[in-house]
Image (cartoon, rainbow, N blue to C red):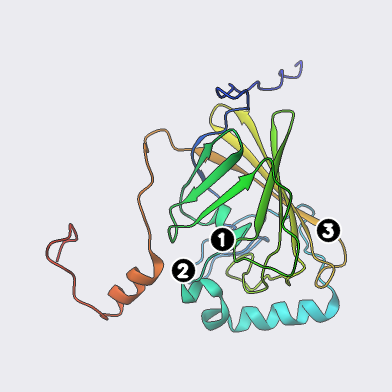
């Protein structure tokens, strides 16, 4: 059969490819970005790492294994901290993309997280780091390319202990495959932890019946589950 013609996305009023909408991954990468079997509270899943293996340096692989053994207390998500990039993209919660002339905005249901990929300004200079890194975007044809630098070293890639240092550098690529599928790809470089760059890729799917995001505030849900406060009867929460 002849190859299908590449999908041509609609354009925004500013002439950018329109990737706006509410999106969500259907993979199990939030639990483990590599192939994994099921365990208590963890669904089995296929990996999203191209080639299957993460090229850890030997000492770093030993640390990853230690992270896994202590994941119940070491995982930043267990403390309701920000997920970081790229993990926030494939958390099991939807997120929304909104475009403006000078930036692309990413709004996440999880923990009220937001980040902005600026299309005009370069990365700031100096010793600085953020939980979500610093995002600078550009368009390559119909693909949004986001360069993310200035990370801290406190986030993980998943719940299984895959981690990075503050030298992490990411290049994300967002490409519409069709009207309702957004292909996500991110190339990971961290010479302090990995022996070479490596890539994660997965499709994201459009929510057609979700006009806006709801909210999931991890710390509040955790405190409520622990009985740390009483529900206010004036809220919509049932008793």
Mark 1 — residue?
30
What is the CA distance from the residue labelled 3 to the residue labelled 2? 31 Å
Whether label 3 touches label 2, CB < 8 Å = no
Q: Looking at the image, which residue sits at the far right?
A: 195
- The residue lying at 59 percent from left, 25 percent from top is 14
Residue 60: x percent and y percent? 78, 78
Q: Is residue 143 visible?
A: yes
What is the CA distance from the residue labelled 2 to the residue labelled 1? 12 Å
Residue 5: x percent and y percent? 72, 18
Please determine whether, in this image, residue 115 is positioned above or below residue 181: below
Which structural element holds mark 3?
A: loop
Dot 1 crowding, Cα within 10 Å, few <14, some 14–19, many 20+: many
Mark 3 — residue?
197
- Residue 190 lies in quadrant: bottom right
Dot 3 crowding, Cα within 10 Å, few <14, some 14–19, many 20+: some
Please determine whether, in this image, residue 215 is positioned above or below residue 2: below
Please give the label number shown on residue 41: 2
């Amino acid at each position: 059969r002849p190859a299908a013609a590449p999908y041509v996305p609609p354009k925004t009023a500013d002439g950018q490819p329109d990737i706006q909408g509410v999106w969500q991954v259907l993979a199990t990468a939030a639990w483990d970005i590599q192939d994994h079997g099921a365990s208590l509270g963890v669904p089995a899943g296929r990996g999203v790492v191209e080639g299957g293996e993460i090229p850890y340096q030997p000492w770093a692989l030993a640390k990853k294994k230690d992270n896994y053994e202590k994941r119940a207390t070491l995982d930043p998500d267990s403390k309701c901290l920000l997920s970081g990039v790229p993990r926030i993209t494939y958390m099991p919660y939807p997120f929304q993309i909104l475009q403006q002339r000078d930036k692309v905005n990413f709004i996440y249901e999880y923990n009220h997280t937001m980040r902005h990929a600026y299309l005009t300004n370069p990365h700031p200079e100096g010793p600085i780091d953020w939980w979500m890194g610093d995002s600078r975007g550009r368009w390559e044809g119909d693909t949004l390319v986001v360069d993310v630098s200035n990370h801290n070293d406190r986030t993980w890639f998943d719940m299984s202990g895959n981690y990075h240092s503050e030298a992490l550098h990411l290049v994300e690529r967002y490409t519409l495959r069709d009207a309702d599928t957004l292909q996500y790809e991110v190339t990971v470089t961290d010479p302090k932890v990995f022996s070479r760059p490596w890539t994660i890729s997965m499709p994201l799917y459009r929510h057609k019946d979700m006009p806006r995001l709801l909210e999931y505030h991890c710390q509040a849900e955790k405190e409520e589950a622990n009985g740390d406060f009483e529900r206010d009867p004036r809220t919509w929460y049932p008793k």
